[in-house]
Amino acid sequence: QVQLAESGGGLVQPGGSLTLSCSASGDIFLINAMGWYRQAPGKEREMVAQRTAGGSKDYADSVKGRFTIPKDNAKNLVYLQMSSLKPEDTAVYYCNLRGYYRDHTFVEVWGQGTLVTVSS
């Protein structure tokens, strides 16, 4: 089974920066995409940023130019580097992985979530 472990959430002032990390462990054969979603109180979960196996990176319009999603392939790690944070970025951030096991079974896994609060 694949598991995701997130870290890095916390309280940050508006205009500040924060980096989240997500590591994948377990026996997965192919990772199709790995990325970050967020859910603010009273709102639906939305995609924030993701990377695909083909190398493309997608960002929500609301975070373009402020967030980046670097990765460390050797460690199956993906980061979310957030800068110029705004109060509206406050949410629980979830790591997401989609891929396949060796027997070609599709798998989608979510992390437990980490809270980011942007407030003065």
Image (cartoon, helix red, strand yellow):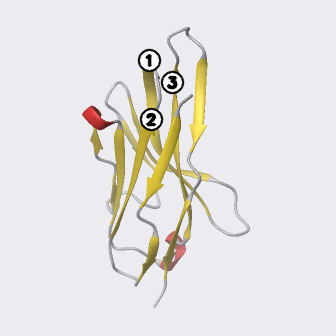
Q: Rounded to the nearest whole Å, what is the CA distance between mark 2 and mark 3?
A: 13 Å
Q: Residues within 10 Å of mark 2 (few under 14, many from 20)?
A: some
Whether 52 is drawn above or below 59: the answer is: above
Q: Rounded to the nearest whole Å, what is the CA distance between mark 1 and mark 3?
A: 8 Å
Q: Earlier in the sequence, mark 1 or mark 3?
A: 1
From the image, tell me which residue sits under label 2. 25
On the rendered image, what quadrant is the N terminus found in?
top right
From the image, tell me which residue sits under label 1. 29
Q: Position of residue 4 (x, y in %)?
A: 50, 43
Q: Position of residue 67 (x, y in %)?
A: 35, 59
Q: Earlier in the sequence, mark 2 or mark 3?
A: 2
Q: Position of residue 30 (x, y in %)?
A: 43, 20
Q: Position of residue 12 (x, y in %)?
A: 41, 80
Q: Nearer the viewer, residue 107 or 13?
A: 107
Whether 75 is drawn above or below 87: the answer is: above
Contact (Cβ within 8 Å) of mark 1 with mark 3: yes
From the image, tell me which residue sits under label 3. 99
Residue at the spot 25% in from the left edge and 33% down from the top edge: 74
